[in-house]
Amino acid sequence: GAVVSQHPSRVICKSGTSVKIECRSLDFQATTMFWYRQFPKQSLMLMATSNEGSKATYEQGVEKDKFLINHASLTLSTLTVTSAHPEDSSFYICSAKGRQYSTDTQYFGPGTRLTVL
Amino acid sequence: AQKVTQAQTEISVVEKEDVTLDCVYETRDTTYYLFWYKQPPSGELVFLIRRNSFDEQNEISGRYSWNFQKSTSSFNFTITASQVVDSAVYFCALSEAFKGSSNTGKLIFGQGTTLQVKP
């Protein structure tokens, strides 16, 4: 149980294009989803928190217009990196927590490795 | 402010050795949760354990055991008889207890400890 998927697992794009990453909770309803960014050999940095049906709450220093988050349903959240640049290259990981399982435990997706050329 | 410190950046052991990963946390909350996650080379974070602040019982799960000491604000993780498959980055994390709509219970991660188990 508590399975979270992410798609795509890997994406390479040209500078200036937008990339959308999907995060799905497969066997539970995710009341809250989180988006993290991880640079090589570093810890996870929380980018934003989203509750179903409401606007995402961004962490300090994270550009809202750059990283668009939509949490339209209880099983799906998307992160769109707009006008991506090489410095946006990173490992993006989502997590979710919800009703069927513990509301206090975040379950993580497998991550998406973004490379911007 | 909440903070998690994993002082050990990298640990290398030989298979079958026991190894303890340290985690020290800071929080002003009276109710909180502590977690351990494993991140193998594939990148996915695997949930290992959650501990409530009011439950200081140690826990054992197979070769894994956890020692929660509220008096020293520590939540250490021991792997007994380590195996090559245990090689990964291990993260300790802290969150305030979920209180409904008033907070999200976001996680504060430590810097991670890279464990290498050699055959």
Image (spheres, helix red, strand yellow):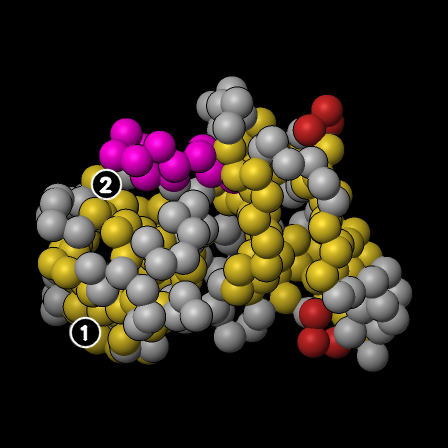
Q: In the drawing, does residue A54 fall left or right of residue B63?
A: left
Whether residue A45 is visible to the viewer of this picture, yes or no, is no
Q: Position of residue B42 (x, y in %)?
A: 51, 75
Quadrant for residue A86, please give it.
bottom left
Q: Is residue B16 above or below residue B70?
A: below
Per the rendered image, the range of residues in magenta is B94-105
Q: Position of residue B44 (x, y in %)?
A: 47, 68
Q: Is residue A44 above or below residue B106?
A: below
Q: Is residue B62 above or below residue B19?
A: below
Q: Is residue B70 magenta?
A: no
Outermost residue, front direction? A100
Residue indicated by mark 1: A14
Residue indicated by mark 2: A58
Residue drawn 80% across and 68% down? B82
Q: Position of residue A105 (x, y in %)?
A: 45, 51
Residue drawn 41% across and 66% down? A2
Residue drawn 85% across and 68% down? B81
- Towards the viewer: A6 or B113: A6
Disc with the residue nearer the chain's start (1 vs 2): 1
Q: Quadrant of the C terminus of chain A?
A: bottom left
Q: Are marks 1 and 2 on the same chain?
A: yes
Q: Quadrant of the N terminus of chain A?
A: bottom left
